[in-house]
Amino acid sequence: MRVLVTGGSGYVGSVVCRHLAETHDIAIFDQRPPQTPSAPFIRGDILNSAHLHEAVHDMDAVVHLAAIPHPNNDPSDAVMNVNVMGTQRVVEAVALGNPRRIVIASSDSTYGFVFGRGEIKPEAIPVDEAHPARPMDSYGLSKLLGEEICRRYTRHCGLETVCLRYCWVWCEREYARLAAMSNTPEHFVGQLWGYVDVRDVAQAIGKSLETPDITHATLNITAAKTFQRAPSVELARRFLPEGLEIRDPGWFEADPHRTFIDWTRAKELIGFEPQYDAWEEAGLSV
């Protein structure tokens, strides 16, 4: 399969490209070349439709990762312009070109917890894809609108679209800080103490490209456990609203440190299974 990866030179994109290059012919579309080339490089801007139409012309699928990655360092209008209009132009180019499927990077920030303010109030845990999406920041809103753009093109022209809601994406630098972060759970309530290894992100993208018979899907992608030493039910009792509904009581009984983000649908639809655990990667014991 010929796959174009937008943002393939970035933090997540470089790992994704190395993974996909094992089984597919890929090309990297970015404003800057990758530090360690793993595929042919196409210099381009996701806000430039001409660049995009030329780049997707002979591709079978597209992975769209290019974005401003959080709302902390850029004005809201810049986040919305790059993330929403960039996604619109990428998906439009795909719809008008040869590819029949696009996989885009969405985020658990669409639920409104990650960059939210005040008390974190999920309606129920674990949080699945049916949970209301109520983003409280420009980044979460931009990702939710990206999902809606995908749904629109699936309805309009039958484009196959997959939106992957990643938790906080981790690599070696996060694991090096794990012990310290586990001692301050109050700082990570918005993340619901969730994360996902970048290699599991790559796995999920690969499976999203290769699984047949998908029209549209929005899927949570997360590690199997939280990154905290305290059991999940204890974290919920200490930091989440009293009386919070546990939607599936067996969820935490199966593993006391299990994630608050339900990835069951990704397992059922594309065969995603988290492979990496923070404590094992850091060489520590929970």
Image (spheres, helix red, strand yellow):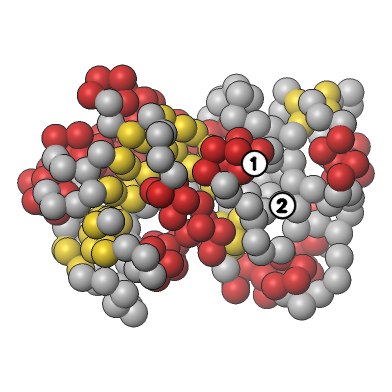
Secondary structure at badge 2 equals loop
> On the rendered image, what quadrant is the N terminus found in?
bottom left
List x then y, in percent, for residue 181.
75, 62
Q: Amino acid at mark 1?
A: Trp
Q: Residue at x 21, y 70 (%)?
A: 40
> Which of the two residues, 50 or 115, is positioned nearer the viewer here?
50
Q: Position of residue 113 (x, y in %)?
A: 64, 36
Query: Does residue 268 appear left or right of residue 78 in this picture?
Result: right
CB atoms of marks 1 and 2 within 8 Å = yes
Residue nearer the viewer, 165 or 190: 165
Report which quarter residue 227 is drawn in.
bottom right
Dot 1 falls on a residue whose secondary structure is loop
Q: Considering depth in this image, is 156 or 182 the residue closer to the camera? A: 156
Q: Please give the label number shown on residue 263.
A: 1
Q: Which residue is mark 2?
A: 224
| Image side of residue 238 versus residue 51, left or right | right
- Percent position of residue 47, x then y: 19, 45
